[in-house]
Amino acid sequence: MDKIKVGIIGLGARGTYMITNLLADLEDLDIVAVSDLYDFKIEDNLRRLKAKGIEPWATKNYLDILEDKEIEVVFIFASWEAHIKLACEAMEHGKAVGLEVGGAYSINDCFKLVETQERTGTFFMMLENCCYGRDEMLVMNMVRQGLFGDVVHCRGGYRHDLRNSIARGEDENYKHYRQRNYLNRNCDNYPTHALGPIAKILDINRGNRIVSVISQSSSSKGMHEYIKNNPERDQELLKRDFALGDVVNTILKCAHGETISLTLGTTLPGYYSRNFEVRGTKGSYVEENKSIFLESDHGGKGYEDNWTPHFNNASDYYEKYDHPLWKKTLQEGLKGGHGGMDGMVIGAFIEAYKKGLPSPIDVYDAATWMAVTVLSEESIAKGGAPAFMPDFTGGAWVIKKREESESLYAI
């Protein structure tokens, strides 16, 4: 197959990073066109691409890309609000879609995403790079080999100090969509980094499903404190109420009794963490101290003595249990940022699209994970009452099994 002709919609921070630091260097892809609403973002990216010897045409109207019959694949890196609309329109035009992550705005939108993909039959993949994190894949591999026993609880989160990005949202030369979302919505607005790897471990939509969502939010004080202490930021924001609480805690219940806890915390000072944790009847993994505990390592008994020497021992399990994709990638060399996860998720897209394989992160995954945002918003508004997750598979989750594939990207 010749190079895949690609159009890019959305040239903000993520789009800029992906096209000039990864996509432009991949031999399988030919970046034909780029689009954004803002001239300065288009000009910046054209300059970056030209330095790599790539000169796509550019437009402020994304429909120009969708109507170009030469373009096969559209990567969508636009604002959260536009994700599902753009993905559906791209599929209606027969374009394969790689969709950047983010939460949804309505359950109807999630159903529309599923209905459009089912009707058009176009290839679709959510580009959730964290599904390809090394420790996430290590633990997934160990769970599937039975080393953790029956998994009963998982934890994840998105703890990332984004105060500067949020405060700069409407700056003329920045224009990021986070600020308007933080001002207007109280929800887990970014659940998929945490939920994606956990959903794969728990076989969500493949013999299991999420049935309900309960969410509570703290007060919102972090942004006002930050803006007050940084006078170069828009002080008019001190007169506005940020709807999003500083910490949003969400609990998901699964059909077979497992629970998942998610934490969003992006407006308080602190270190980055995805809070990844898996607890099973025979073992556990905890990201906060990078540790794995297997009862089989301790004579089948619990460990009640001094546990701190076992902190940071996860790397001890790489040699035996590292996921085959990571073993291969480390030999060949990492591509892209975020510890190589970006290169892997795009590699997964390219392989599945070119070979006609099932999407590793399909439309049902995307709809379910994105719906958590909507349901957490509903639950918070109702004082923590449960909100019920629709079955986007139409009952197919009961009979559908994890895809057996020789592809190392299959998850």
Image (cartoon, rainbow, N blue to C red):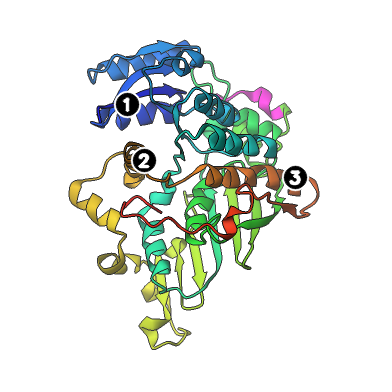
Q: Which amino acid, mark 1? A: Thr
Q: Position of residue 193 (x, y in %)?
A: 50, 47
Q: Mark 3 or mark 1, which has the lower sequence index? A: 1
Q: Estimate the spatial distance between the alpha carbons at disc 3 and disc 1, rounded to whole Å.
A: 38 Å
Q: Earlier in the sequence, mark 1 or mark 2?
A: 1
The image's mark for residue 378 is 3
Q: Amino acid at mark 2?
A: Gly
Q: Confirm whether the magenta stretch covers residue 90.
A: no
Q: For mark 2, what is the residue? A: 356
Q: Position of residue 220 (x, y in %)?
A: 69, 42
Asked if 315 appears above or below 21 in the picture, the reply is below
Q: Quadrant of residue 34?
A: top left
- Residue at the (41%, 44%) spot, across then down: 129
What is the C-alpha distance between the residues marked 1 and 2?
Answer: 27 Å
Between the residue at mark 2 and the residue at mark 3, the CA separation in whole angstroms equals 38 Å
* Residue 84 picture location, percent across and down: 58, 31
Residue at the far right in the pictured view: 382
Tell me which segment is drawn in magenta: 230-238
Residue 269 visible in rendering: no
Q: Do labels 3 and 1 touch, CB within 8 Å? A: no
Q: Nearer the viewer, mark 1 or mark 2?
A: 2
**Identity, as a three-letter code, of the amino acid under mark 3:** Glu
Element carrying mark 1: helix
Residue annotated with mark 1: 20
**How many discs appear?**
3
